[in-house]
Image (tube, grey):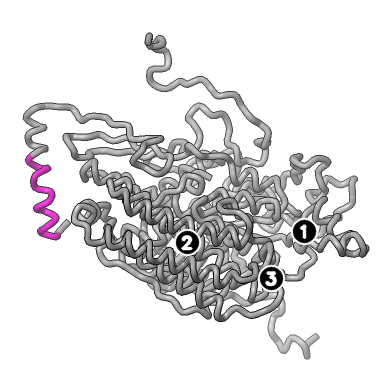
Amino acid sequence: MTADNNGETPSAPTLSPLLQIVTDRLGALVIEHKSALGDDRIHVARENVVEALRILRDDPALAFDLLLDVTTVDYLGQPDDFETNLEVWDKNRNVMRRQPQRRHELVLPPRGPNPRFAVVYHLTSTTHLHVMRVKCRVPEDDPVISSVTSLWPGANWLERETFDLYGIRFEGHPDLRRIYLYEEFIGHPLRKDYAKHGEQPIQEYVGPGAKEPRRPH
Amino acid sequence: MSDPEQKNLVAPTSGNARAMEELHTPPMRLQFGPSHPATHGTVKITLDLEGEQVVWSDVEVGYLHRGFEKECETGYYYQNIPYTDRLNYSSPILNNVGYCMAVEKLFSIVTPPRCDYLRVIGGELSRLADHMMCVGASAMELAAFTPMLYLIEARELMLDLTDALCGARVTTNFVRIGGVSADMPEGFAQFARERLDKAMTLVEDANKLLTENPVFRRRMEGTGYLSPKELVAWGVTGPMLRAGGVAYDIRRVHPYLAYGDLDFEVPIGEHSDNFDRYLVRMAEIPQCRSIILQCFEKMPEGPVDANDPRVRWPGKGRVFNRMEELIDQFKLVTEGGMAPVGEVYHAVEAANGELGFYIVSDGTGKPWKCRCRAPSFSNISPLSKMITGGQLADVVPTFGMINMIGGECDR
């Protein structure tokens, strides 16, 4: 053992160069970090998201000036790398790898202990050209997170889209309303518990002029 | 706005505003769209006008929303490739490439070099068709009908080449995970050279009709301005960003496929207005042609598919005669290729900007989440800012040069 390790701790993962700078600058704001498949990712708490993203944008060594994407993943409380080492063919356990009986049937994994959603930000820098992913866990019963429209005006529509499809409310957003679906739509279709075949009839229009009598032609 | 010429342009409208104040006329509400002959895209713009000046605007998208991401979550990885054709239907192969490269990154598959070159050829054909369509349609909306006819004919030649390459003109479904559907047909290089030469003559004709045309220039120059800093802050990418002088092209800054070996230029503009966006697109067209011709020179021989049993479809002859391949086929059909647990983001340079796919895998044959970062969506979000304060007539060229594609923006 000692001959192999040469005194180094084998469990400490080597950080990628980008994550070294990021963890150095953000310090305790980084809850968890990981480099996998060529991507760098950090987790921050949702109270600190604006502060952390502001540091990432303004620090000259990082300079993440281009917000590529804001979206959400509905993890159903599972951890980021889900539950591994599950038996594929064990029919008695409610495992997620079990195959559905029919083509469009969705077999959902059990709810996990973590907060249900993860809001995901993809950032890049037009000067240093590095890309990074920032994630924030948001619980189901209080799906609220601070808006980053004050940092990037381009976050406006991306956050509206996330609100529309996942029901995450962004505090401080100037104009938070649905963007793809109509205002009367019930539910948020990209949540995992919204069935793909859960079609709903066109909801009644309740906006201005709804109760006016039909115009004669 | 510190430019003195700009001030001269604004001066008459301020007089107009004073007249409006004296007359106490409320602003007129104008609904522009969702299906308007002067916009090539399904989008509704609500404008408040004082005379000809836009004082407030609101942009509404979503008329083509059809649940691409929800649909992807219920299909195996390979079953989602045809959906990506329908994202940006002007340049479908680029979408195929973007999605398949993201999945390959998840599976850690390395594609053979011949496949990379074929993808570059297909992608650049798509980019040519997209730029021709964008410039032609925008010119038509500014009442220049003849260049549109030339450019649509040139685009038709590109679609002929796409047809020869993969058997379909628009819904290509050309790229597979780990490869492409088939090698290029015999004599394709010669066919492509002829067609590209013919198309370049047509583009040159359109160029002569447009670039020096005073009416076209007066409507394009100085309109739709956003400073480079604002462009970056709004998340704008692609020809719009490069027209502002920011040389951000993913083919150059993160070379993927065979782009590292190819010699091409990234044209950039300086004024960040509609005319520079037009010029950047027109300057990219010969570059795309040069890339395709270089690919024919440099393309190595070899297989076009990564021989990976998780994603490879075995040939029918082998399926019927060998047990292992029969099992492979059975597993692929019934449960898809089992992906490792993880998440990836991979971006390619599409015709309008950075097209990224963010895929989260839970270890099954279906993506847990498949997110498409569409360039049109981010590019059109500052439209309201770009048109407010300008003239009503400037809305049309600004919208045309954003080149919003409904299928991609609304997904």
> Range of the magenta residues?
B3-15
- Type of the residue with mark 3: Val
- Type of the residue with mark 2: Arg
Q: Is residue B257 left or right of residue A156?
A: right
- For the residues labelled 3 and 2, the Cα–Cα distance comes to 22 Å
Residue B270, x across and y down, in percent: 27, 67
Q: Is residue B190 left or right of residue A147?
A: right
The earlier-in-sequence mark between 1 and 3 is 3
The earlier-in-sequence mark between 3 and 2 is 2
Residue placed under numbered mark 1 in the picture: B338
The earlier-in-sequence mark between 2 and 1 is 2
Above or below residue B196? Residue A2 is below
Kindly identify which chain the residue marked by label 2 belongs to: B
Q: Nearer the viewer, residue B349 or B297?
A: B297
Q: Residues within 10 Å of mark 3 (few under 14, many from 20)?
A: many
Of helix, strand and loop, which one carries label 1? loop
- Type of the residue with mark 1: Met
Residue placed under numbered mark 3 in the picture: B304
Of helix, strand and loop, which one carries label 2? helix
Which quadrant holds the N terminus of chain B? bottom left
Q: Residue at x 38, y 9 (%)?
A: A216
Kindly identify which numbered label has been placed on residue A34. none
Q: Give the total number of marks visible in the rendering.
A: 3
Same chain? Circles 2 and 1: yes
Q: Residue at x 56, y 64 (%)?
A: B122
Kindly identify which chain the residue marked by label 1 belongs to: B
